[in-house]
Image (spheres, grey):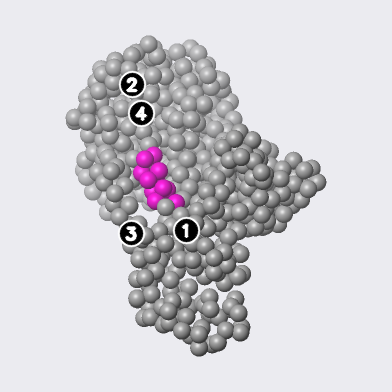
């Protein structure tokens, strides 16, 4: 359980806007173990996908600093010809929108077959077709021989996502990155796709990075969770710890903004403001501070770093110790203010 | 596929009928007729009226139209007043010349457009792309007839690489190698001049589509499979980006017709375009209507070709 498959060290992915570089992913440390599902959670625009793309080397014009060790090989900034030997073979990726993730002019069979062709050139044409049919079966597509010859527009969204999954797992990857695999699908299909990923996880023994903003999905799928905010990891813990004792203000705000059937509150928590855009990221201090303005600024660290508060449970910045939701206990907040001054 | 083609062919019938009516009506609306201008003024006006009756100019329009269409069906396009010969025969010689000119222009157009568009799209915003884009903007802004004159002056007169008029050197035996060579030699300058201007549309089209396709999600899927860049371009981007080019093909033919009218006159190339302009100037109406009809049919056939090509390459259009 503890052998590391992927280890990300101090990753910084920056994009050039006009003449400056802006980091969409900053100071990220993460590990993914074999046979483990690591969920990365966060609002839209917090850098989850940018992180996944950095691992897959899919960024076009980004500056990537830091290290990404995949099976002890540093794959950050690997030249394309070496990267292409890993992508699709040892690392597979499932994309967000199945409606656009498939080439509209290529039959399904060829699109899956291409992944085999690129990494398994010794397979004959018929062997490849057999394998594709087998994969289609595996991802639960009915009448695979028929679907083999079909074009993407002839399939429904759920079916297309199954095809995308088949492409990702064609060569039995050791690392599977699922970038919001259910966001574009309707709810019934979502659960089918999640069940499928769960099944595949059992018989593939791969490490899976699951990117999502849906906490329900996290609860269902993940072993460990990393919460991202504004390009940084703000909290990492195993799924039970995180759901039972979330610490970071952002994690707590996230949980509080999800409707909960058990304790029907009249109003949901709304996180103030929006995720800052790339150019407007706070350059120093706690990046979440502007969105919890009622918390005294002095409780934030000047250079927030990840603290291990319990084995395997990391939290960024010290503000979590003093965080309360507004109105939760205003007296206490005042007391804090008094005691600090 | 066959069903689609047949259906598409059937649509052409009403198109052509409508086209013939429009041309006929417009021709009849033009002031004057063959007997009002280029005719000996000493002839008795009563005799002219008689001739008009004889030629059916006073018949009701639907009868005139029926006569005209009846003639068309039998391949009779009327008689040229100027050349005193059947329009069918007159056009016959020209149509072949125009066909070769159009074909050569199309070949040059795509020979230029596809590599330039691909380079420009693949390396977008590079110096190369900016150079190509500058060329296309100059091409957009340059009127064809001025550009053609400059080409004629530079390569025809100053440098003297190419002949300046005609479609073949006189006195050569048709069918011999020299004859064919001379034909080709006469084609190059006019078709290249036209292609250099006409191609800019297609270059920009292809470039923009490649830039657009490059950002599509399925390109990410292809990269994530581990496909090398060359394969990503050839298999995934190009096939998708050439679709609109195929769709554009038919319109290219239509614009060729417009272009050939200038080009054939400037280069003294005996094709349909030259005949068309001369016939308008001399009020040779039967030729004008016949040529207009043929141009119109060529445009309709161009659109048909576009649709058929598109249905061949784009699976989403195939009707089952």
- Residue depicted at x 50% and y 88%: B46
Q: Say which quarter of the image contains residue B265.
A: bottom right
* Mark-to-mark CA distance, 3 and 1: 21 Å
Q: In screen coordinates, is A35 left or right of A236?
A: left
- Residue A131 visible in the picture: no
> What's the magenta region?
B302-313
- Residue pointed to by mark 1: B88
Work out how far the residue at label 1 is from the one at label 4, CA to CA, in angstroms: 53 Å
Residue B251 percent coordinates (x, y): 49, 53
* Residue that carries the numbered disc 3 in the rendered image: B13
For marks 4 and 2, give the one nearer the viewer.
Answer: 4
| Same chain for the residues under marks 4 and 3 in the image | no
Nearer mark to the viewer, of 3 and 1: 1
- Left or right: residue A308 versus residue A139 is right
Closer to the camera in the image, A134 or A238: A134
Tell me the tag on residue A170.
2
Q: Chain of mark 3?
A: B
| B26 to A252, vertically: above or below | below
Determine the chain carrying the residue at label 1. Answer: B
Marking on residue A111? 4
């Amino acid at each position: 359980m503890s052998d590391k498959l992927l280890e990300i060290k101090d990753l910084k992915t920056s994009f050039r806007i006009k003449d400056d570089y802006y980091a969409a992913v900053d100071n990220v440390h993460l590990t993914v173990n074999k046979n483990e599902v690591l969920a990365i959670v966060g609002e839209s625009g917090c850098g989850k996908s940018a992180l996944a793309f950095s691992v897959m080397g899919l960024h076009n014009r980004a500056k990537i600093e830091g290290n990404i060790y995949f099976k002890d090989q540093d794959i950050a900034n690997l030249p394309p010809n070496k990267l292409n030997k890993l992508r699709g073979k040892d690392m597979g990726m499932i994309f967000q929108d199945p409606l656009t993730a498939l080439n509209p002019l290529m039959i399904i069979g060829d699109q899956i077959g291409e992944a085999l062709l690129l990494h398994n050139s010794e397979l004959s044409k018929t062997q490849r077709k057999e394998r594709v049919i087998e994969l289609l079966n595996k991802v639960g597509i009915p009448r695979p021989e028929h679907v083999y010859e079909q074009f993407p527009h002839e399939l429904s969204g759920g079916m297309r996502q199954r095809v995308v999954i088949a492409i990702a797992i064609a060569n039995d990857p050791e690392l599977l990155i699922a970038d919001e695999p259910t966001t574009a699908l309707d709810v019934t299909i979502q659960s089918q796709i999640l069940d499928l990923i769960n099944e595949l996880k059992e018989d593939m023994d791969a490490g899976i990075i699951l990117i999502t903003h849906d906490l329900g999905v996290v609860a269902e799928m993940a072993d460990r969770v990393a919460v991202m905010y504004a390009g940084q990891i703000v909290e990492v813990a195993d799924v039970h710890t995180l759901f039972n004792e979330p610490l970071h203000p952002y994690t707590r705000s996230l949980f509080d903004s999800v409707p909960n059937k058990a304790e029907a509150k009249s109003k949901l928590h709304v996180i103030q403001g929006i995720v800052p855009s790339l150019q407007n990221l706070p350059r120093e201090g706690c990046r979440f501070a502007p969105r919890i303005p009622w918390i005294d600024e002095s409780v934030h660290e000047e250079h927030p770093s990840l603290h291990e508060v319990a084995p395997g449970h990391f939290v960024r910045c010290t503000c979590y110790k003093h965080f309360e939701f507004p109105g939760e206990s205003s007296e206490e907040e005042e007391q804090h203010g008094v005691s600090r001054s | 596929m066959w069903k689609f083609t047949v259906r598409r062919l059937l649509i052409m019938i009403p198109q052509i009928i409508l086209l013939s009516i429009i041309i006929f009506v417009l021709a009849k609306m033009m002031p004057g007729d063959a007997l009002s201008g280029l005719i000996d003024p000493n002839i008795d006006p009563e005799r002219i009226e008689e001739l008009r009756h004889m030629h059916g100019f006073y018949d009701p329009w639907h009868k005139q139209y029926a006569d005209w269409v009846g003639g068309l069906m039998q391949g009779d396009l009327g008689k040229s007043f100027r050349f005193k010969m059947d329009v069918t025969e007159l056009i016959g010689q020209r149509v072949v010349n125009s066909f070769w000119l159009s074909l050569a222009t199309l070949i040059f157009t795509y020979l230029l457009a596809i590599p330039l568009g691909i380079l420009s799209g693949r390396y977008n915003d590079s110096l190369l792309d900016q150079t190509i884009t500058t060329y296309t903007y100059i091409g957009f802004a340059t009127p064809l007839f001025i550009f053609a004159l400059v080409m004629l002056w530079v390569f025809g007169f100053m440098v003297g690489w190419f002949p300046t008029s005609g479609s073949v050197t006189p006195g050569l035996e048709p069918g011999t190698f020299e004859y064919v060579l001379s034909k080709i030699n006469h084609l190059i300058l006019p078709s290249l001049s036209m292609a250099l201007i006409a191609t800019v549309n297609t270059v920009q089209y292809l470039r923009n589509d490649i830039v657009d396709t490059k950002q599509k999600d399925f390109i990410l899927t292809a990269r994530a499979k581990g496909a090398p860049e060359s394969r990503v371009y050839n298999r995934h981007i190009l096939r998708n980006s050439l679709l609109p080019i195929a769709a554009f093909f038919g319109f290219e033919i239509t614009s060729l017709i417009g272009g050939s009218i200038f080009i054939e006159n400037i280069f003294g190339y005996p094709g349909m375009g030259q005949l068309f302009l001369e016939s308008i100037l001399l009020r040779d109406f039967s030729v004008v209507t016949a040529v207009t009809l043929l141009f119109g049919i060529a445009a309709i056939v161009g659109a048909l070709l576009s649709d058929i090509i598109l249905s061949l390459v784009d699976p989403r259009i195939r009707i089952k």
